[in-house]
Image (cartoon, helix red, strand yellow):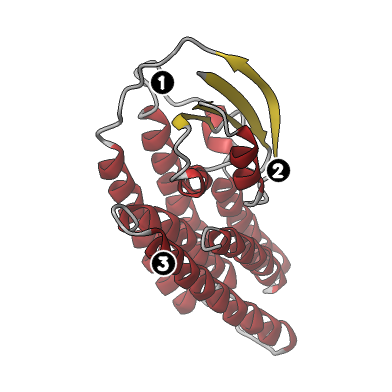
Amino acid sequence: MEKTIFEITKMDCPSEENLIRMKLDGISSIKKLSFDIPNRKLTVFHHGQIDLIEKSIQELSLGAKILRTEKTDETQFEKDTNQRKLLWTVLAINFAFFLVEMTTGLISKSMGLVADSLDMLADSFVYGISLLAVGQTLIKKKRIARLAGYLQITLAVIGFVEVVRRFFDAEKLPDFTTMIFVSILALIANGVCLFLLQKSKSKEEAHMRASMIFTSNDVIINLGVIIAGLLVNWLNSNKPDLIIGSIVFVLVVQGAVRILKLGK
């Protein structure tokens, strides 16, 4: 048995962990995957086929590189029987906040909230694909991934077009209080998801470390919308909201491209 440790520089939230799990699904030589999201590390326990494993991970464009491969005597691995329950929990949280942010974003005229809602939807897609793909054939798994990826890109493009329209047209200022309040709630929701998923890794991780939270791209986005809300009020301009919305739409498209790579 060998274990290979990867550094994955762009792995900063549990949804990217799930992407990697799905990408490596079916490689028979892999016996266990151990993720360390705060430190952006992945340890793969396997019997050979390291070239195939490395190639599969690199196809996701997450900045993966091998740090080292070494022999290990570890052969007994516990199965996480609560994995599906956890995935359903974080799926429900992310989808609920997609609905909340999309609704409040449209009502308050905040493209930052609308864009963040699509980021929540993107995470929901990842968790949902993982759950729906269980027991399905490889062709069906790829079909589900492609459908989710193309839908995500379509919504992001529509959102970006609306940002451009609002940038040149005179629009009512977004409600900055709604932006800040809802983003704080979303920040808490992302923190809860990270805590639940990371806590499940081992009994020793029963408490939440600060590094676990602030390595998440989702949390950075939430903070960005909060700052944009403050700037909207301070500058009396909708431009900060449009700027953060544009940035998040780009990130949503990047996430969609990774999902599409599961369909190859």
Give x and y (percent) for residue 46. 51, 27
User: Foreground mark, 2 or 3?
Assistant: 3
- Hey, which quadrant is residue 169 in on the image? bottom right
In the image: residue 258, left or right of residue 239: left
* Quarter of the image that includes the C terminus: bottom right
Q: Is residue 177 above or below residue 172?
A: above
Q: Amino acid at mark 3?
A: Ile
Marks 3 and 1 sit apart, C-alpha to C-alpha, by 33 Å
Contact (Cβ within 8 Å) of mark 2 with mark 3:
no
Q: Taking the image as drawn, is residue 178 in sight?
A: no
The local secondary structure at tag 2 comes to loop
| Badge 2 amino acid | Gly
Q: Which residue is under mark 3?
A: 144
Q: Compared to 193, does 107 lie above or below? A: below
**Mark 3 falls on what kind of element?**
helix
Q: Is residue 130 left or right of residue 235?
A: left
Identify the residue shown where x is 73% and y is 67%.
Answer: 235
Q: Alpha carbon of mark 2 to alpha carbon of mark 1: how far?
A: 26 Å
Residue at (43% x, 32% y) in the render:
198
The disc label shown at residue 205, or none: 1
Q: Are marks 2 and 1 in contact (CB under 8 Å)?
A: no
Residue type of the residue flagged with mark 1: Glu
The numbered dot on residue 63 is 2
Near-viewer residue (158 or 141): 141
Callout 2 crowding tier (Cα within 10 Å): few <14, some 14–19, many ≥20 = some
Residues at discs 3 and 1 in contact (Cβ within 8 Å): no
Q: Secondary structure at mark 1?
A: loop
